[in-house]
Image (spheres, coloured by chain):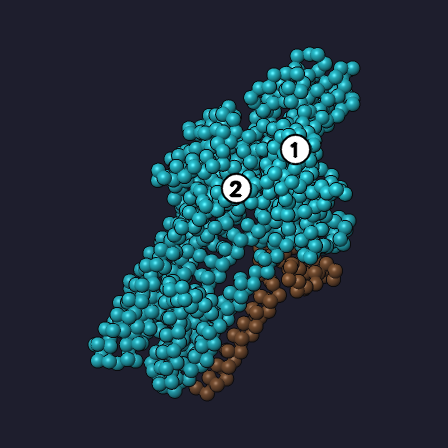
Chain colours: A cyan, B brown
Amino acid sequence: MSVTEAPGGIGCIGCLTAPMAQGKGEAAAVDEIVLAVPGADCAACIPALEEGLASFPGVRDVRVNLSLRRLRVRHDGSLAPEDLIPEVARLGYEALPLDLVALSGTENDRVGRDLLMRLGVAFFAMMNVMLLSVAVWSGATDATRDIFHLLSGAIALPTVLFSGQPFFRSAWAGVKRGRLGMDFPISLALVLASSISVYESFHGGDHAYFDAAVMLTFFLLGGRYLDHRTRAAARSAAQELAALEVPRAIRLTGEGQETVAVADLLVGDLISVRPGARVPADGVVTAGESEIDRSLLTGESLPARAAPGGTVSAGEVNLTGPLTVRVTAAGRDSSLSRIAALVAVAEEARSRYTSLADRAARAYSPLVHTLSFSAFAFWMWKTGGDLRFAVNISAATLIITCPCALGLAVPAVVTAASGKLFRKGLLIKSGTALERLAQVDTVVFDKTGTLTLGAPEPLDLVAHDADDLRVALALAQGSSHPLAQALAQGSLGLGVRPAHVTDVREVPGHGIEGVWQDQRVRLGRADWVGAKAGDVTATTLRIGGAEPVTFAFADALRPGAEGLVTALAAQGMELHLVSGDVAGAVEGLAQRLGIPAWTAGARPEEKAAYVRALASQGRRVLMVGDGLNDTAALAEALVSVSPASALDAARAASDIVLLGRDLAPVEDALRIARQAVRRMRENFALSAAYNVVSVPVALMGFATPLLAALAMSLSSVTVTLNALRLK
Amino acid sequence: MDILILLVPVSLGLGLLGLGAFIWTLRSRQYEDPKGDAARILSDRWDDRPAPVEDRAPRQRRPDAAGPQGGERG
């Protein structure tokens, strides 16, 4: 589509930005464009992109962000993303425009920087207090020891107060709701350790736990920061994907047309849907003829005809001619929203999943409180009421059992695993996705757009007569219809030269016609050229009065699909294919890939029910799908994957997004997920092992600050190293 | 042990210096593209002359968008 048409575009990626710049994007930056460049992953990409684009007219400054794989272009106000995308493509990179407004949240990661600041302060304090503590441990006595304790306290107290705030806040929130999470024992240990240490320092005691308090703060904050990073990455992925689509509609008013947000459409409005754009709301066609692509909504690979009186649904793509549609259902009532409601129900069911860390925390808190309190009670009884001694023991128990390693066990593994998967082209959107993925034993695939690319590929072109091919090519080049384009590309690939066809014109909704050697030639729908329609995806050519020739198409397989299916079957996974497409197409693909169980013609609710039925048989289902019709099933499944080309609703409902075209990384994801869960379990075992050794020592009253420091740092470092073992 | 009167403040001062440096790097957003910065330091693009001033993006404090950090480019 041309740039001048861009303001009207609704769904297609190329036409996003003009409405963005006019509308809510205006405040963000008119002179700045942000593009997602998923392919930028090496040092050589920086000069290639920056120097390649710097000379483009209007560009002031280009900056590649390799970590986020984004390209930020500052310009003089004359450029739109669709000017730059072909230029970036010429340099060899795929680029997608991003909505600056939707991104703003992640660019300013305030929470992350705040945590990092507290972490830095805790690190500084830990190092200095440790320096002083080592002097005490190595034999400083009397006045020197007391001075060192007081100095440590002067550093540690403000640090604990500042850096420990995230724990105090969340512990307090837990207390108010009547639940004691992991943060309560942490806060208790911090407060108790600091206060008894202050008391001991002023009374010339032997042990002060200031170093333990700041070390606890540091290691726990480290775990908290990693956890936040994972979540922020997930959130930014979601925002980045949401930023790819700006929902706008063109409303026809008495005087002309206006661009409005889809949410502002009312029943009865007349809207215009241009070729290439997505239908924004359900409605009835009042004018125009075209063909519409329903594949994202229903999984049908064959374009459907749209003519006055016909109905269209939100999410479908208009292919050939402009349509005027009277809105019959908008917002809440549209088919889109009904699917969204299905998704919400299914997602609620999923959020009940309890992560490994939650289960560990649930077992941990009561255990620690009981231990610490029994130690206190026992020593009160044993020493005949020596409060100072008993409190010291119970505080030492709390400090030693404190979950440094527990707080790091899961975040460290998740960070390592998500980093690995991101490099393989997978975005993990949910923190518990890896744990769920590791349990999968059944995989349900969607067909159109998932196992296949959703793009047709002509079959057996060589079998056709050379003249037919040449005429068909000449006609096909005159249309942007996907079948015509696929036919043109396929023929050009075979070295076919177009015939000299004159008066080529496209008849929206029907096909293309022209004149060749004084005969009328037509390429298009079977009934229009005068042939009988079959049930395969096909287009028909008729030259004059000759017998019509049918070009059949099949949906091209997504790269890696065959390998993935074979590998999963070899692992003993149960495979299913559930599609909304016609039986013939689904059966053909199932046989080609060797998927034993397949279902055709499934509606969105049926897909979700299919997944639910499998789950009720005790299967742990991974759903791989891309369409709106898959959305409910994606949310229903234990864990779900969708390709980046999927509709935003589908990507929002899934846990993992595949960035590239290739399906092969899904297998890596399964492997890495299983490995990651194994590491998490090992980490829990490791931190438990440290406690098994150190807790009895603490309970017996032999705990020293040195022992606490050793146990804490050793266990934290071991779990981190163990997480990094991930391959 | 009198030396401690000197040594302890010195060690604390050095630590604070480090902390201050860390806070500065954090404030000036030097952790936004660690992977890119690691690659950029090996680039010989600005070896002969510093990056032109316009090319170094100003360090704007815009709430909506973090300006690219031109200062790291040199």
State left or right for residue A48 relative to residue A233: right
Q: Disc 2 is attached to a residue of which chain?
A: A
Rendered image: mark on residue A338: 2
Disc 1 is placed on an element classified as strand
Disc 2 is placed on an element classified as helix
Where residue A189 appears, x then y in whole percent? 37, 70
Instruction: Compare marks 1 and 2 and give the one earlier in the sequence.
Output: 1
The answer to whether residue B70 shows anywhere in this view is yes
User: Which residue occupies the foreground of this view, A376 or A214?
Assistant: A376
* Res A598 → quadrant: top left
Q: Residue at x 52, y 29 (%)?
A: A581
Where residue A277 appears, x then y in whole percent? 66, 38
Look at mark 1 in the image and give the residue it sits on. A285
Q: Are marks 1 and 2 in contact (CB under 8 Å)?
A: no
Q: Residue at x 24, y 77 (%)?
A: A380
Q: For the residue marked with disc 2, what is the amino acid?
A: Arg
Where residue A651 appears, x then y in whole percent? 53, 44
Q: Looking at the image, is B57 positioned above or below residue A124?
A: above
Q: For the residue marked with disc 1, what is the amino acid?
A: Val
Q: Residue at x 66, y 62 (%)?
A: B62
* Res A310 → quadrant: top right
Q: Looking at the image, is A688 positioned above or below residue A47?
A: below
State left or right for residue A382 relative to residue A224: left
